Image: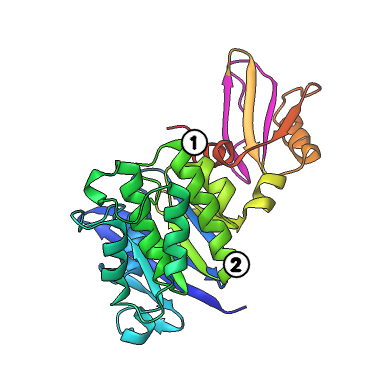
Amino acid sequence: MEPVIECRNLTHRYGRRKIYENLSFDVPEGRILGLLGKNGTGKTTTINILSGYLEPQAGECRIFGENIRTMSPLTRRRIGLLLEGHVQYQFLSIEQIERFYAAFYPAWNRDAYYGLMEKLQVAPGQRIARMSCGQRSQVALGLILAQNADLLVLDDFSMGLDPGYRRLFVDYLRDFAKAEGKTVFLTSHIIQDMERLIDDCIIMDYGRILVQQPVAELLATFRRYTFPAADDAALPQGDGIYHPAVWKGRGELYSFASPDEIRDRLTRAGIACGELRWETLNLEDAFIGLTGKY
């Protein structure tokens, strides 16, 4: 399957601060991929590079096989981009803004827009200015879906949405993308939403990618291990072990390694592990296990 997005050796800095160096990844066609990382790790920088608003200091990005710096207008029309979760023309009604936007997009899919508005239970004549912040964000998201783009790029799509609206849109977006064969690249700080939505994830740390793989595979293979340990115990480091720590006589570490491999590593470090325990994790806990709590 040909990748829709190809990024090779991206390097970018703001002044002396390095965001990342030689960052490379692909986004396969028809998949929903979530970019996860702590604040300041380069998520929005990556979105801005993909949208052509920011030129990386080194490296190249291609979308649908074209370099983003020289992309043709016809190819750009295949991309739906959301950088802000709010509608600009708030004096218009639900119906008026749909007609306004439809004039700019030849492949406009009004059913995608009105399907979401129906779930919001808003009347076509309701003015956007009189809607809640979360409802206005949903209008913006509906307008993006109605563009009927082959690739959707959404930066922090859940900003300003309460849990009910987030769940509504996550389910609607996933059903829409799968039914229509869309490719989606998105970021969000609400990782619980991402677990329900995405097929694949990229987890970034400062300056590098820690993981890029299907979410189901990550959650099936990444574990938290706990075991008795003295507070001054020298726990094994590196080589597939993440964030080992001891707190009040209890050791903890995260790893993709099997229980037998971890038991062997602990034994070689001089730590008795007869009470070694392990558990698989949800996506938020796996994210913290890979990136650390702080």
Question: Image point 74% across, 33% down: which residue?
Answer: 268
Q: Amino acid at mark 1?
A: Gly
Q: Position of residue 113 (x, y in %)?
A: 42, 62
Q: CA distance from mark 1 to mark 2?
A: 36 Å
The residue at which mark 1 appears reads as 292
Nearer to the camera, 276 or 47: 47
Residue furthest to the top in view is 248
Give the position of the C terminus as an image quadrant.
top left
SS type, badge 2: helix
146 over 174 or under it: above or below: below
**Amino acid bearing label 2:** Ala
The answer to whether one can see residue 42 in this image is no
| Residue at numbered disc 2 | 179
Q: Position of residue 200 (x, y in %)?
A: 58, 58
* Residue at the image point whose x is 35% and y is 43% from the top: 134
Q: Provide the residue span drawn in magenta.
A: 223-246
